[in-house]
Amino acid sequence: MLFKHAVWAMAFRPFYALAALFGALSILLWGFGYQGTAELPSFYWHAHEMIWGYAGAVVVGFLLTAVTAWTGQPPTRGGALFALTALWLLARLALYLPDGAAISGISGTVFFWYAAVCMALPVIRSRNARNYIAIAALFVFGLTHAVFHLYLQPFQAGALLNGLLAGLVMVAGFIGLVGMRIMPFFTAKRLNIAQVASPMWVALSALVLPMLMAVLMMFQTALPLAGLLGIAAGIINLVQVFRWWHKDVVREPMLWVLFAGYFFTALGLLVTGIAQWLPAYLSLGVHLIGVGGIGLLTLGMMARTALGHTGHAIYPPPSPVPLAFWLMVLATLTRVFAAFASGAAYTHSIYCSAALFALALLLFAWRYIPWLLKPRADGKSG
């Protein structure tokens, strides 16, 4: 039976595989000159597909996998997971059809809202109130996608830019949510040290502040306040990075990649907030989040969680994984340089960053997709 195949056992399997391949292809297309579609031209296509396409797939794959451990309930699998994957694929492919942006907008939005329902069911059944906020965030993420598509007809450049920023900031919020939960725990467990505790308001702020910022930007409301929220979120998250840090983290690729990604995300939120008053820094803030934050965190989390859930040891990481992490770091630094460059230096740095980003994802795909398509190595379900 189709739905009995291992790939439909848990959400990380199809979505990590698709995200790695799609992310590599999309970034190469953009980096080497592809200018999008008639309805979604230039950087609007690039940002749309990296935020709601690539990052959206990883976010949903991770959350629908993690919620099983958080609640003890059965995972989203089989036909439900197949339908969710089909919605994501339709949202990607429809953009290339005549007048397909509307189909992409509807299917992509339903994808996130369906994922929110899939997460809500085990959370509600187990009365796991701690994760209600994550369900709300998935719904808001879908709402940013829907509102962005509403601004396409008629084409409203300024509103579309804020719509893209809303989606990007929501991904930064998911990074904050996940980082607050796992980074001090993973660090303490691996290094055999005491876990650093954080006040509840700090843990909530990592998601709530970016979520509020995203809502304001999505509806073009109180943009200076949105900037202040970004600055506050960035500062709080930077403080957390230094609170969690331990000198031995540098010896563990599976740890330092998370710290690096969280640091870049926090710095990106801070700079994006400041850019509400100094627009020249907007590109820097966007790509600190988009390449440094999303690139490193998604790669690091996919590499780590896929090992555990396919029955493979997490430490030491498979041989190409540390190299993939370093390639993504280089992609980040190169793209940051591009934010200050011009002329040939800008063009070549974009080429280089795109190639490094894609190569990092392709190394992951080469090593992990065979595992994602097979039953667990230890014979367990999942």
Image (cartoon, rainbow, N blue to C red):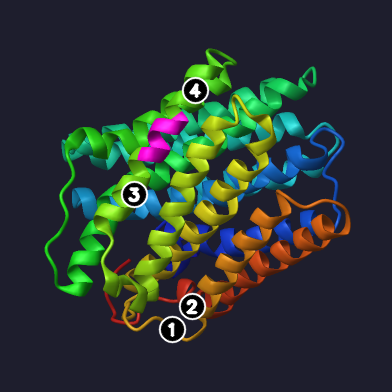
- Closest to the observer, 89 or 244: 244
Query: In terms of image quadrants, where is residue 152?
Result: top right
Question: Callout 3, which amino acid?
Answer: Val
Q: Give the quadrant of the C terminus.
A: bottom left
Q: CA distance from mark 4 to mark 1?
A: 41 Å
Residue depth check, mark 3 versus mark 4: number of the one nearer the observer: 4
Whichever of labels 4 and 1 marks the residue nearer the N terminus, that label is 4
Q: Which mark is residue 318?
A: 1
Question: Callout 4, which amino acid?
Answer: Ala
Whichever of labels 4 and 2 marks the residue nearer the N terminus, that label is 4
Q: CA distance from mark 4 to mark 2?
A: 37 Å
Q: CA distance from mark 2 to mark 1?
A: 6 Å
Residue 250 at what x, y percent from top left?
Answer: 36, 74
Q: Which mark is residue 321?
A: 2
> Can see residue 79?
no
Which segment is the magenta one? 230-235
Label pair 3/2, CB-CB below 8 angstroms: no
Label pair 3/1, CB-CB below 8 angstroms: no
> Can see residue 270?
yes
- Closest to the observer, 277 or 61: 277
Q: Which residue is mark 4?
A: 226
Residues packed near mark 1 inside 10 Å, few (<14), some (14 to 19) or many (20 plus): some
176 falls in the magenta region: no
Residue 296 at what x, y percent from top left?
Answer: 50, 61
Label 1 element class: loop
Task: Specify the farthest residue to the bottom.
Answer: 319
Label 3 element class: helix
Whichever of labels 3 and 1 marks the residue nearer the N terminus, that label is 3
Query: In terms of image quadrants, where is residue 223?
Result: top right
Q: Which residue is mark 3?
A: 178
Residue lying at 72% horizontally and 22% vertically, measured from the top left: 158
